[in-house]
Image (cartoon, helix red, strand yellow):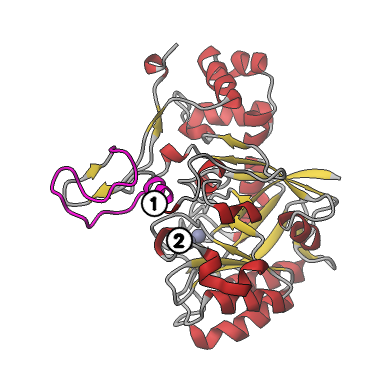
């Protein structure tokens, strides 16, 4: 078996010169994602969730024709530099929930398009609202030999637990058994999801939901598989035949922009014990529910319960968001260590001190051992790592 670093939720800004996701950076394009951004980050596998958008699908087809991508017999698309592209579609169901469907081949993408075309307004754009229910999407992914995964499951914005239901089992009935994997999203981690009894059945993914090259790989997963292809990925996410997710790497939930509930009229992140029902400033109950507050509202346990297969969740902050790391320093570090994940996970602390200074070495050491001191986020703003001089000893 081998191990691979994977980020399985990445958007595309433009394809064939036209915008695919309006809020995404135009610099995030398929070919540069595979040949520039993924290697710079240190990712072996990239899941690109706009693959069924017409211009993106045509670019994949063109890259296959030119030999820049090889469509594998076992599914997935291998770039010449060894990066595996996993094609996927993010779609908003009639419940107002975002779902991911990972697909093995061009043929399956075409069948997805055929099904969804009459159910969305514009098949050229990302994450379209479709007149399809989650249960139908699960069924569709089975027909396509794909993998269904609820996206950013706990966020108030379009996450299934965040805005739709307290129980997927209640929502889905017998189809619940088809669900094997769940994306945690930036504002939650394994321990938070582990407060819900039904989450014991799922593998957890920590993905970036990147809309720009800078955010690629701000969360990632370490996967154990025999080879890089779609069939192996499916076994891995379903936790079968020795394939599994062996570690999650993600942002500290307190850094997430929806960690605690927020009152828009007072511009206040509410820090009272969760779950908060009303704003302590104006008594308003129209709050933006924080992920933490929501989980505390619907939890089954006081302490997280994890199945034996649950891997560790390691808190990570991307290189450029660490105190004292500007563009120039990041460049020097990437040059010295090869790529960002190599630097964050494997570089020797002594060498980091020599190349990047003793403060940075101290930060990386602390990060690998546990959690960095954080100034929390909320109300749509991300948290930050506290400056070194404010750290407790
Ligand atoms: Zn989404
Ligand atoms: Zn997304």
Find out whether residue 276 is within the magenta segment. yes
* Residue 269 at least partly seen: yes
Q: CA distance from mark 1 to mark 2?
A: 9 Å
Report the quarter where the N terminus lies.
Answer: top right
Q: Position of residue 201 (x, y in %)?
A: 65, 56
Magenta stretch: helix, strand or loop mostly = loop
* Residue lying farthest to the front in this orientation: 301
Find out whether residue 245 is within the magenta segment. no
Instruction: Answer above or below: position of 361 versus 90.
Output: above
Report if the CB atoms under discs 1 and 2 are less than 8 Å apart: yes
- Say left or right for 268 vs 231: left
Instruction: Name the residue at 42% across, 37% down.
Output: 254
Q: Position of residue 49 (x, y in %)?
A: 58, 63
Instruction: Answer above or below: position of 166 versus 54.
Output: above
* Mark closest to the chain's N terminus, 1 or 2: 2
In which image quadrant can residue 181 be found? bottom right
Instruction: Name the residue at 48% across, 74% down.
Output: 93
Q: Position of residue 76 (x, y in %)?
A: 75, 63
Q: Which residues are magenta?
A: 271-297
- Say left or right for 96 vs 16: left
According to the image, label 2 marks what residue? 166
* Residue 202 at least partly seen: no
According to the image, label 1 marks what residue? 297
Instruction: Answer above or below: position of 151 versus 82.
Output: below
Using a 10 Å C-alpha cutoff, classify the residue at mark 1 as few (fewer than 14 neighbours), some (14 to 19) or many (20 or more).
Answer: some
Q: Secondary structure at mark 1?
A: helix
């Amino acid at each position: 078996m081998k191990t691979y670093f994977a980020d399985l939720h990445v958007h595309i800004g433009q394809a064939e010169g036209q915008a695919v996701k309006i809020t995404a950076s135009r610099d995030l394009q398929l070919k540069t994602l595979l040949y520039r951004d993924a290697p710079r980050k240190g990712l072996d596998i990239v899941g690109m969730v706009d693959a069924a958008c017409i211009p993106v699908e045509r670019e994949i087809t063109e890259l296959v024709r030119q030999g820049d991508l090889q469509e594998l017999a076992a599914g997935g698309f291998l770039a010449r530099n060894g990066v595996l592209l996993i094609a996927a579609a993010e779609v908003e169901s009639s419940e107002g929930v975002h779902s991911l469907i990972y697909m093995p081949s061009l043929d399956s993408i075409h069948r997805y398009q055929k099904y969804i075309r009459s159910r969305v307004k514009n098949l050229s754009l990302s994450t379209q609202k479709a007149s399809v229910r989650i249960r139908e999407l699960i069924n569709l992914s089975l027909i396509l030999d794909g993998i269904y995964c609820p996206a950013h499951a706990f966020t108030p914005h379009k996450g299934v637990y965040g805005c739709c239901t307290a129980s997927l089992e209640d929502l889905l009935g017998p189809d619940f058994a088809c669900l094997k994997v769940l994306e945690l999203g930036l504002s939650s981690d394994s321990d938070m999801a582990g407060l819900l009894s039904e989450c014991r059945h799922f593998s957890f993914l920590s993905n970036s939901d990147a809309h720009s090259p800078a955010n690629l790989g701000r969360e990632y997963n370490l996967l154990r598989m025999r080879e890089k292809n779609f069939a192996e990925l499916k076994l891995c996410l379903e936790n079968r035949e020795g394939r599994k997710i062996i570690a999650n790497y993600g942002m500290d939930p307190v850094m997430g922009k929806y960690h605690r509930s927020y009152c828009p009229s007072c511009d206040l992140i509410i820090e009272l014990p969760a779950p908060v029902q009303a704003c302590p400033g104006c008594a308003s109950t129209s709050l933006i529910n924080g992920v933490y507050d929501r989980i505390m509202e619907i939890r089954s346990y006081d302490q997280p319960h994890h199945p034996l297969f649950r891997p560790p969740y390691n808190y990570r902050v991307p290189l450029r968001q660490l105190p004292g790391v500007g563009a120039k320093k990041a460049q020097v570090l990437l040059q010295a260590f090869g790529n960002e994940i190599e630097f964050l996970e494997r570089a020797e602390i002594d060498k980091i001190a020599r190349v990047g200074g003793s403060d940075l070495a101290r930060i990386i050491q602390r990060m690998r051992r546990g959690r960095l001191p954080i100034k929390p986020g909320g109300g749509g703003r991300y948290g930050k790592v506290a400056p070194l001089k404010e750290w407790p000893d």
